[in-house]
Image: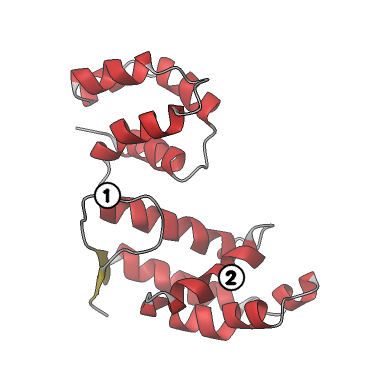
Amino acid sequence: MMTDEIKTIFLQFLVDRIPIKAFEQWLYSTPELEQMMNCDDYFSLLAIDFNNKFAFRNIYNIIQKYISLDEFVKFKFSILLHDIIEHNEYSPSAIEETYYLYCDGYEFLEKLGLCYGEFLTLFEYSNQQDVDNMYPQIIEDARQVLQWFNTSKIVFIEKKKYDSLYGYEYKDFR
Protein backbone atom coordinates (compact mmCIF):
# COMPACT_ATOMS: atom_id res chain seq x y z
CA MET A 1 0.00 0.00 0.00
CA MET A 2 1.25 3.43 -0.98
CA THR A 3 1.82 5.91 1.88
CA ASP A 4 0.29 9.38 1.72
CA GLU A 5 3.79 10.87 1.68
CA ILE A 6 4.76 8.92 -1.44
CA LYS A 7 1.43 9.66 -3.12
CA THR A 8 2.05 13.35 -2.46
CA ILE A 9 5.47 13.15 -4.12
CA PHE A 10 3.90 11.38 -7.11
CA LEU A 11 1.16 14.02 -7.31
CA GLN A 12 3.64 16.89 -7.04
CA PHE A 13 5.63 15.37 -9.87
CA LEU A 14 2.54 14.81 -12.04
CA VAL A 15 1.54 18.48 -11.72
CA ASP A 16 5.07 19.79 -12.36
CA ARG A 17 5.75 20.98 -8.82
CA ILE A 18 8.79 18.70 -8.54
CA PRO A 19 11.41 18.92 -11.29
CA ILE A 20 12.40 15.69 -12.97
CA LYS A 21 15.96 15.77 -11.55
CA ALA A 22 14.63 16.22 -8.00
CA PHE A 23 12.24 13.32 -8.58
CA GLU A 24 15.16 11.20 -9.79
CA GLN A 25 17.15 11.96 -6.63
CA TRP A 26 14.11 11.20 -4.46
CA LEU A 27 13.52 7.92 -6.29
CA TYR A 28 17.06 6.67 -5.67
CA SER A 29 16.93 7.71 -2.00
CA THR A 30 13.57 6.01 -1.26
CA PRO A 31 14.20 2.25 -1.08
CA GLU A 32 10.87 1.59 0.69
CA LEU A 33 9.18 2.38 -2.61
CA GLU A 34 10.12 -1.11 -3.81
CA GLN A 35 7.73 -2.67 -1.27
CA MET A 36 4.90 -0.32 -2.22
CA MET A 37 4.94 -0.78 -5.98
CA ASN A 38 4.56 -3.62 -8.40
CA CYS A 39 8.06 -5.05 -8.92
CA ASP A 40 8.01 -4.42 -12.69
CA ASP A 41 6.89 -0.82 -12.19
CA TYR A 42 9.57 -0.14 -9.59
CA PHE A 43 12.40 -1.50 -11.73
CA SER A 44 11.01 0.26 -14.81
CA LEU A 45 11.19 3.54 -12.89
CA LEU A 46 14.80 2.87 -11.92
CA ALA A 47 15.66 2.06 -15.54
CA ILE A 48 14.34 5.33 -16.97
CA ASP A 49 16.89 7.64 -18.58
CA PHE A 50 16.01 10.89 -16.81
CA ASN A 51 17.87 12.90 -19.47
CA ASN A 52 15.66 11.54 -22.26
CA LYS A 53 13.10 14.02 -23.63
CA PHE A 54 10.37 11.41 -23.04
CA ALA A 55 11.34 10.78 -19.41
CA PHE A 56 8.37 12.66 -17.95
CA ARG A 57 5.90 10.71 -20.09
CA ASN A 58 7.60 7.40 -19.20
CA ILE A 59 7.48 8.18 -15.48
CA TYR A 60 3.91 9.42 -15.79
CA ASN A 61 2.81 6.17 -17.45
CA ILE A 62 4.14 4.20 -14.49
CA ILE A 63 3.12 6.28 -11.48
CA GLN A 64 -0.33 7.33 -12.68
CA LYS A 65 -1.49 3.76 -11.92
CA TYR A 66 -0.99 4.49 -8.22
CA ILE A 67 -3.06 7.69 -8.14
CA SER A 68 -6.83 7.78 -8.59
CA LEU A 69 -8.36 10.36 -10.88
CA ASP A 70 -10.18 11.92 -7.93
CA GLU A 71 -6.88 12.30 -6.01
CA PHE A 72 -5.11 13.73 -9.06
CA VAL A 73 -7.73 16.30 -10.02
CA LYS A 74 -8.41 17.36 -6.42
CA PHE A 75 -4.68 17.85 -5.94
CA LYS A 76 -4.46 19.96 -9.10
CA PHE A 77 -7.42 22.09 -8.05
CA SER A 78 -5.98 22.35 -4.53
CA ILE A 79 -2.75 23.82 -5.88
CA LEU A 80 -4.76 26.38 -7.82
CA LEU A 81 -6.82 27.25 -4.73
CA HIS A 82 -3.77 27.38 -2.44
CA ASP A 83 -2.10 29.80 -4.87
CA ILE A 84 -5.13 32.05 -4.40
CA ILE A 85 -5.23 31.62 -0.62
CA GLU A 86 -1.50 32.21 -0.17
CA HIS A 87 -1.67 35.44 -2.22
CA ASN A 88 1.61 34.63 -3.93
CA GLU A 89 3.15 35.35 -7.34
CA TYR A 90 0.88 32.71 -8.91
CA SER A 91 -2.31 34.26 -7.52
CA PRO A 92 -3.22 36.45 -10.51
CA SER A 93 -3.02 33.58 -13.00
CA ALA A 94 -4.77 31.20 -10.57
CA ILE A 95 -7.62 33.67 -10.09
CA GLU A 96 -7.91 34.17 -13.82
CA GLU A 97 -7.87 30.40 -14.36
CA THR A 98 -10.99 30.02 -12.17
CA TYR A 99 -12.93 31.98 -14.80
CA TYR A 100 -11.84 29.71 -17.64
CA LEU A 101 -12.53 26.59 -15.57
CA TYR A 102 -15.98 27.88 -14.67
CA CYS A 103 -16.66 28.53 -18.37
CA ASP A 104 -15.51 24.97 -19.11
CA GLY A 105 -18.29 23.61 -16.90
CA TYR A 106 -16.84 23.48 -13.41
CA GLU A 107 -19.86 25.18 -11.88
CA PHE A 108 -18.55 24.82 -8.33
CA LEU A 109 -16.11 27.62 -9.29
CA GLU A 110 -18.94 30.03 -10.09
CA LYS A 111 -18.21 32.57 -7.35
CA LEU A 112 -14.43 32.52 -7.83
CA GLY A 113 -14.72 32.56 -11.61
CA LEU A 114 -17.39 35.22 -12.00
CA CYS A 115 -16.67 37.49 -9.04
CA TYR A 116 -12.90 37.55 -9.37
CA GLY A 117 -11.53 35.66 -12.37
CA GLU A 118 -13.77 37.32 -14.92
CA PHE A 119 -12.65 40.76 -13.74
CA LEU A 120 -8.99 39.90 -14.28
CA THR A 121 -9.73 38.23 -17.61
CA LEU A 122 -11.94 40.88 -19.16
CA PHE A 123 -10.09 43.92 -17.89
CA GLU A 124 -6.61 42.48 -18.26
CA TYR A 125 -5.43 43.63 -14.87
CA SER A 126 -2.57 46.05 -15.12
CA ASN A 127 -1.27 46.21 -11.58
CA GLN A 128 -1.02 44.20 -8.40
CA GLN A 129 -3.54 46.52 -6.72
CA ASP A 130 -6.35 44.96 -8.80
CA VAL A 131 -5.48 41.58 -7.32
CA ASP A 132 -4.81 42.90 -3.82
CA ASN A 133 -8.29 44.47 -3.71
CA MET A 134 -9.82 40.98 -3.93
CA TYR A 135 -8.34 40.06 -0.56
CA PRO A 136 -9.27 38.95 2.07
CA GLN A 137 -12.74 37.91 0.74
CA ILE A 138 -11.35 35.69 -2.02
CA ILE A 139 -9.52 33.61 0.59
CA GLU A 140 -12.78 32.54 2.22
CA ASP A 141 -14.32 31.71 -1.15
CA ALA A 142 -11.31 29.57 -2.15
CA ARG A 143 -11.37 27.82 1.24
CA GLN A 144 -15.05 27.02 0.68
CA VAL A 145 -14.22 25.14 -2.54
CA LEU A 146 -11.41 23.26 -0.75
CA GLN A 147 -13.92 22.31 1.93
CA TRP A 148 -16.20 20.82 -0.73
CA PHE A 149 -13.31 18.64 -1.90
CA ASN A 150 -12.34 17.61 1.63
CA THR A 151 -15.92 16.63 2.53
CA SER A 152 -16.51 14.84 -0.81
CA LYS A 153 -19.22 17.26 -1.86
CA ILE A 154 -17.34 17.47 -5.17
CA VAL A 155 -16.16 14.09 -6.48
CA PHE A 156 -14.43 13.48 -9.80
CA ILE A 157 -15.43 10.48 -11.90
CA GLU A 158 -12.82 7.96 -12.99
CA LYS A 159 -11.93 7.86 -16.68
CA LYS A 160 -9.31 5.92 -18.62
CA LYS A 161 -6.80 8.75 -19.14
CA TYR A 162 -6.07 12.13 -17.68
CA ASP A 163 -3.50 14.57 -18.92
CA SER A 164 -4.76 17.98 -17.91
CA LEU A 165 -7.10 19.76 -15.54
CA TYR A 166 -9.78 20.14 -18.20
CA GLY A 167 -12.43 17.72 -19.30
CA TYR A 168 -13.16 15.77 -16.13
CA GLU A 169 -16.66 14.87 -15.10
CA TYR A 170 -17.64 15.36 -11.50
CA LYS A 171 -20.55 14.81 -9.17
CA ASP A 172 -21.74 17.77 -7.13
CA PHE A 173 -23.30 16.83 -3.78
CA ARG A 174 -23.50 20.33 -2.32
Q: Residue 95 got which mark?
A: 2
Residue at 34% in and 21% down: 45
Residue at 52% in and 36% down: 18
Residue 90 visible here: yes
Check disc 1: other Cα within 10 Å, few if <14, some if 14-19, many if 20+.
few
The quadrant of the image that shows the N terminus is top left
The one of 68 and 103 positioned closer to us in this rendering: 103
Q: Position of residue 69 (x, y in %)?
A: 27, 52
How far apart marks 2 and 1 lie (CA) works out to 27 Å
Amino acid identity at mark 2 = Ile
On screen, residue 60 above or below 74? above
Mark with earlier residue (2, 1): 2
Q: Position of residue 103 (x, y in %)?
A: 45, 78
Q: Position of residue 159 (x, y in %)?
A: 21, 55
Left or right of residue 54: residue 40? left
On screen, residue 158 above or below 98? above
**Helix, strand or loop for disc 2:** helix
Residue at 38% in and 37% down: 10
User: Residue 88's image quarter?
Assistant: bottom right
The residue that label 1 is drawn on is 161
Left or right of residue 28: residue 153? left
Residue at 37% in and 50% down: 163
